[in-house]
Amino acid sequence: MDKSRFPNFYRLSIKDRVEAVYKRGLISEEDYLALKNQQQQLDLHSADKMIENVIGVMGLPIGLGLNFLINGKDYVIPLAVEEPSIVAALSSAAKIFRNHGGFKAESGDPILIGQIQVVNINNLEKARSEILSKKEEILNLANSFHPRMVARGGGAVDLDVKTYPMSSFEQDMLIIDLHVDTRDAMGANLVNGMCEGIASLIESITEGEVFLRILSNLSDKALASASVIIPKDALETADYNGERVRDGIVIASDFAHADPYRASTHNKGIMNGIDAVALATGNDWRAIEAGAHAYAARHGRYSALSKWSIDNKGNLVGKIEMPIKVGTVGGPMESNPAVALNLRILNVESAMELARVMAAVGLAQNFSALKALVTEGIQKGHMTLHARSVVKAAGTPIKLFDQVLEKLLISGDIKVWKARDILEDLQRKTSRKPSGLIAHKSSSNEAIEGIGFGKVILLGEHSVVYGRHAIAVPVPQTIRVKVEDCKEGVTLMIPSWGIEYQLDKDIEQRQSFEKPAGAILERLNLSNKGMRIEVFPDIPRGMGLGGSAAIAVAIIRGLSNHFNLGLSDEEVNGMAFESEKIAHGNPSGIDNTMATFGQPLIYRTGEPPLVERLNINENFSLVVGFSRHEGVTAKTVRNVREGWRKNTAMYEKIFDDIDDLVLKSVTAIQNNDFALLGQMMNFCQGLLNALQVSSPELERLIDLAREAGALGAKLTGGGGGGAIVALVKNESEVAEAIESEGFETLSFTVSKQ
């Protein structure tokens, strides 16, 4: 098994990612439980023992770099970093490299240099000669201070002597570089201790005065290198051929070698990856940075740490070499539980192996940055992820996050002040926003070419699949789609969900989530067209609000408008129903119908289905409460079907009872009897419990709504997670009661027709 390959890892919830890593055998059960319960973090008491004047602990996200194959070994690489796109870029580069042999990496002995400065020497040449002649004596004394390091194969192994003029005084100084093999330790304290320990001997030998005794962070005796070879065809993108990408990377590399201003940014990109590994593994990233930049200027002019070239077969060849002196044992690794856990995930056996991994990470990050620069540009590559950080910095609440993000991306002005302006505007406009009949043409942004509507089912979910009635009303939230032409391939992007993938051309190779979109394109004879489909969802996924159907409708409408296909609403609805069959197996058709028409409906399956507009004579208010877990409609529909097959008569009776509640609710709505409607909703929840589609969290939400004065409350959609809907007199009281427990809500009014 390829241990570092986790297809679609980014699509999983955090909980499912942790479980996937555990099932792959990368962490122990103890580590799994620690991550699951977030107990791996540094506690305040431990932090107080590490530095002075502690007042708290600051966290950083830990992501996993996937797909790494280094010297034939798979690695999953923990990265502690706050900058968007680094983890995704590394994983993407590593995936390309692994298909062509992965990285070849090497590392030298873990030598750290300690320096002893000697001044006020009467005879400089004699002092130099004496130091060299007594090298063994000096090394033996240094090693006597750390016999256990010597026993592990390390210790002081060599020394150099050099002289420099002192610019402030008319004399020269003598510098002794002590080379110490620190094995798997970072070794800073060890080397400083050795330098202190041999200072008196140095003074007696040189007849001078020892001044500074300190390690050097230019660890050029501990060089690590990595290289890759990539065929040009592997570099091809939807808009650029492989030869152009290859040549562009080489040209950009030459720029960094020639110009120090470019080299500084070039090397900063390399360190984006290396520093993230250093932080995750408890290493001194500041020391690594200092050594890297000093090494980049070793020839008297600052230059690039990596080099990209073309070999005689036309392949792109990337190489990096730089000092990387790190450790895998010692204080930080033992005092910070997150560091220890990260090292176990990384599964390196020595500091030298860790250095090789970090060199590979630096080269991968450099490749991704250069590739982005020479294709779509680095700004576009970073835009979505950077925008998410900006939206968060603007103080955007979760319920408005996706809307603010979408509008910010469309504006193209990715600034905190702009996000705040958008947020304030949305808060003014969407406070208790009424719904009702909504036209499917978008006037807010001409670039939007397709729209699909979300919904809540008031009563009738699950039974509607078996030929009974259901009542559904639209929510204010929609899904919008923008379609753009590109050279080739079909790319689907959902920026607010962090989704971007290219549809596999081979139907048999498509994964389950690709199949509905693929079927739509084939039905419209567009599968061979080059396009980018960008989806902007207000509807949260997996919450029972018909998100998948709304996406299908929005995409179909977007394609119809973009390619001038002239599809009618009925044709859009029919195609969306076929898409829902692929996604959910046995849908009723209510979700795609609501997504298409966006108005209150009474619905019943059949050939043809019954679709009647629900007459509403008086406004009523609803509060939707969102659980913390996504519901999987296909799973709950499948479970109900299995139960129906085993106990058909019992389930048919439940479906009949739900149908009776639905029909009474239609009458209640038409008679403005909302107390009765609330009762019907409560009764329906009891029957849904009998179908075993509720959950403890949904029941808690329902209780909160009822206790706060809701006339009725029940789950909405497939269940098993997702959301509840409450019929309310006072929106704010019910919403605040739910939100006080840490849940999110959506409040709106269903308007009379």
Image (tube, grey):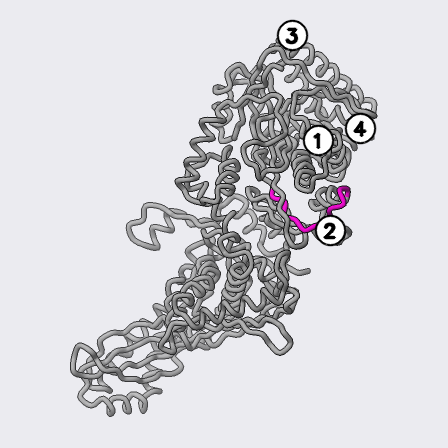
Q: Which residues are magenta?
A: 523-534
Q: Amino acid at mark 4?
A: Trp
Q: Residue 142's x, y, as percent?
A: 33, 79
Q: Residue 302's x, y, as percent?
A: 38, 72
Whichever of labels 4 and 2 marks the residue nearer the N terminus, that label is: 2
Vertical position of residue 443 compared to residue 58: above or below: above
Identify the secondary structure beneath mark 1. helix
Residue 417 is tagged as none
Q: Quadrant of the N terminus?
A: bottom right
Whichever of labels 1 and 2 marks the residue nearer the N terminus, that label is: 2
Residue at horizontal 48%, vertical 57%?
A: 340
Residue assigned mark 3: 671
Between marks 3 and 2 in the image, the one whose residue lies nearer the viewer: 2
Could you tell me how far apart the alpha carbons at marks 4 and 3 are, in whole angstroms?
34 Å
Vertical position of residue 135 compared to residue 662: above or below: below
Whichever of labels 3 and 1 marks the residue nearer the N terminus, that label is: 1
Between marks 4 and 2 in the image, the one whose residue lies nearer the viewer: 2
Between marks 3 and 1 in the image, the one whose residue lies nearer the viewer: 1
Residue 528 is tagged as 2
Does the magenta-highlighted stretch encompass residue 301?
A: no
Classify residue 435 by image quadrant: top right
Residue assigned mark 4: 644
Residue assigned mark 1: 592
